[in-house]
Amino acid sequence: MTIKKDAMSLVKKNIQGIIGSKVKFESDRGRNKTTVEEGVIESVYPSIFTIQMYEGKLPSRKISFSYTDVLTRSVQITLCK
């Protein structure tokens, strides 16, 4: 499967547009294991973006994903309302 640069830049642009927003994400952990968690998109970098996780109101941990993860659907992101 080849990933076009314009598709990658579109994903990056969409994620840049929701920095600071609360999101729910489902990530594929392999061997039929998936996790569903919530966090806030914190930063966008050239190859990755970070999501800050919270326990209550305190920050607990930070997770990073690549834009390729979104394109290959290893990670699915949904905005929380």
Image (cartoon, grey):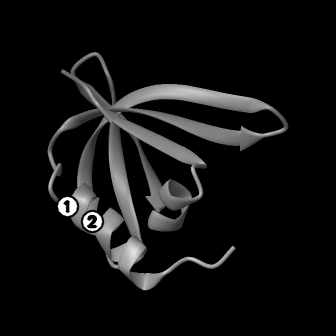
Q: Residue at x 59, y 58 (%)?
A: 72
Q: Amino acid at mark 1?
A: Gln
Q: Amino acid at mark 2?
A: Val
How many marks can you see?
2
Q: Residue at x 40, y 72 (%)?
A: 7
Q: Horizontally, is 34 left or right of 76 in the view?
A: right
Q: Residue at x 49, y 81 (%)?
A: 4
Quick one: quadrant of the N terminus? bottom right
Q: How far across and down, in percent of the image, does residue 32 sit?
A: 80, 32
C-alpha separation, residue under disc 2 versus residue under disc 1: 6 Å
SS class of the residue under badge 2? strand
Residue 16: which disc? 1
Q: Horizontally, is 47 left or right of 17 in the view?
A: right
User: Where on the picture, by quarter, is residue 25?
Assistant: top left
User: Where on the picture, by quarter, is residue 30?
Assistant: top right
The outermost residue toward the top is 56
Q: How far across and down, in percent of the image, does residue 60 sit?
A: 37, 33
**Callout 1: few (<14), some (14-19), or many (20+) C-alpha neighbours within 10 Å?**
some
Marks 2 and 1: CB-CB under 8 Å? yes
Residue 44: which disc? 2
User: Relative to residue 81, is residue 32 depicted above or below?
Assistant: below
SS class of the residue under badge 1? helix
**Callout 2: few (<14), some (14-19), or many (20+) C-alpha neighbours within 10 Å?**
many
The outermost residue toward the bottom is 5
Quick one: quadrant of the C terminus? top left
Q: How far across and down, in percent of the image, does residue 40 sit?
A: 26, 39
User: Relative to residue 11, is residue 41 depicted above or below?
Assistant: above
Pick whichever of labels 2 and 1 is earlier in the sequence: 1
Q: Residue at x 41, y 67 (%)?
A: 48
* Number of the front mark, 2 or 1: 1
User: Relative to residue 64, is residue 52 depicted above or below?
Assistant: above
